[in-house]
């Protein structure tokens, strides 16, 4: 009788080992299926409006380029505007000089960044330069003109700077 019990226990042990081996195979298959899903290409159809907008804006505008443009135009506008006694015109010349220098130095096109930075700086300096007029109510059209003039100075400055760079680096 003890031999029968030993055989029964051994048979049960073998069945348990078989079940454990089957379970390991199932787990391996599941891990392989999860790995195959991780390697699948991402679907961009389900992307939200915000992520699609950021991707499209990222093609045209660089955050780093915008910050560099804003700092460069602000510094130049304050320096050149401080030397020239013409007020807003001196600030616009400073924006143009900064955009021209940036266009001459860099090999990448930064038209959008410099136009935005020049426009924002032109609007801000116009607002601060004519604070009394702005507070009395006639400031909104004046700030809009300042934005347009600053954007034009930034865009044209960068264009002429890139044109000079192209002319200096072109083979004859």
Image (cartoon, rainbow, N blue to C red):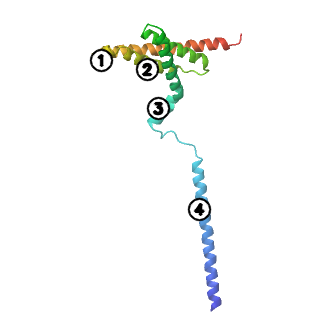
Q: Looking at the rendering, which quadrant does residue 142 occupy?
A: top left
Label whose residue precedes the other's in the sequence (2 or 3): 3
User: Is residue 129 in sight in this rendering?
Assistant: yes
Label whose residue precedes the other's in the sequence (4 or 2): 4
Q: Secondary structure at mark 3?
A: helix
Q: Which residue is mark 4?
A: 27
Q: Which residue is mark 2?
A: 120
Q: Is residue 154 above or below residue 86?
A: below
Q: Which residue is mark 1?
A: 135
Label whose residue precedes the other's in the sequence (3 or 1): 3
Q: Secondary structure at mark 4?
A: helix
Q: Which residue is mark 3?
A: 53
Residue sticking out furthest to the left: 136
Question: Tags 4 and 2 in contact by the CB under 8 Å rule?
Answer: no
Give the mark toward the camera: 2 or 3.
2
Question: Tags 2 and 1 in contact by the CB under 8 Å rule?
Answer: no
Q: Quadrant of the N terminus?
A: bottom right
Give the mark toward the camera: 3 or 1.
1
Label 2 crowd bin: few (<14), some (14–19), many (20+), radius 10 Å: many
Q: Position of residue 109 (x, y in %)?
A: 57, 21
Gap in angstroms between the C-alphas marked 1 and 4: 72 Å
Label whose residue precedes the other's in the sequence (4 or 3): 4
């Amino acid at each position: 009788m003890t031999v029968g019990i030993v055989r029964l226990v051994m048979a049960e042990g073998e069945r348990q080992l078989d079940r454990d081996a089957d379970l390991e195979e199932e787990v391996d298959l599941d891990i392989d299926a999860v790995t195959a899903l991780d390697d699948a290409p991402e679907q961009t159809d389900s992307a939200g409006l915000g992520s699609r907008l950021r991707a499209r804006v990222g093609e045209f505008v660089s955050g780093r380029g915008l910050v560099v443009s804003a700092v460069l135009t602000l510094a130049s506008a304050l320096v050149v505007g401080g030397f020239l006694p013409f007020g807003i015109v001196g600030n616009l010349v400073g924006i143009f000089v900064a955009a021209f220098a940036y266009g001459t130095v860099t090999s990448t096109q930064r038209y959008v960044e410099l136009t935005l930075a020049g426009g924002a700086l032109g609007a801000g300096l116009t607002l601060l330069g004519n604070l009394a007029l702005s507070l009395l109510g006639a400031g909104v059209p004046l700030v809009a003109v300042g934005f347009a003039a600053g954007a034009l100075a930034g865009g044209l400055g960068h264009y002429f700077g890139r044109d000079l760079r192209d002319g200096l680096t072109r083979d004859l």
